Image (cartoon, helix red, strand yellow):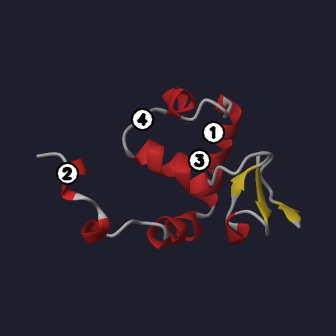
Amino acid sequence: MVTETEHLYVARDDSILNGEPIIKGTRTPVRAVVETWRLGIAPEDITTHLPHLTLAQVFDALSYFADHPDEITRHIERNRVSDDLIDPRSKNP
């Protein structure tokens, strides 16, 4: 079941990522936009990294995060890959 939010481009769908907030019409979680932004990538450039999103969707995802920081931070932490599970060959020297 799709649940609308107060944000135009953000919804929850129980069948996608257990109802985690996503960009409406995609399987992209809001946390993916937030984590990309936290890497220092400007919102205007996030669409280069996530080309299926529009700039309006990116800004709405960041707006959702501003309104719900604890919720999105919990999703980020829950999905973080533990350092001991990362192949050392993929880490920077």
Residue 31 relative to residue 82: left or right: right
Q: CA distance from mark 1 to mark 3?
A: 5 Å
Of callouts 4 and 3, which one flags the residue occurring earlier in the amino acid sequence? Answer: 4
Seen at 80% across and 63% down, the residue is 13
The residue that mark 3 highlights is 62
User: Would you identify the image quadrant in which residue 85 lies?
Assistant: bottom left
Three-letter residue code for mark 4: Ile
Toward which corner of the image does residue 47 lie, by quadrant?
top right
66 or 83, which is in the foreground?
A: 83
**SS of the residue under disc 2:** helix
Residue bearing mark 4:
41
Q: Which residue is mark 1?
A: 59
Q: Residues under labels 2 and 3: Cα distance?
A: 32 Å
Residue 53 drawn at (x, y percent): 66, 34
Q: Nearer the viewer, mark 4 or mark 2?
A: 2
Q: Position of residue 61 (x, y in %)?
A: 64, 47
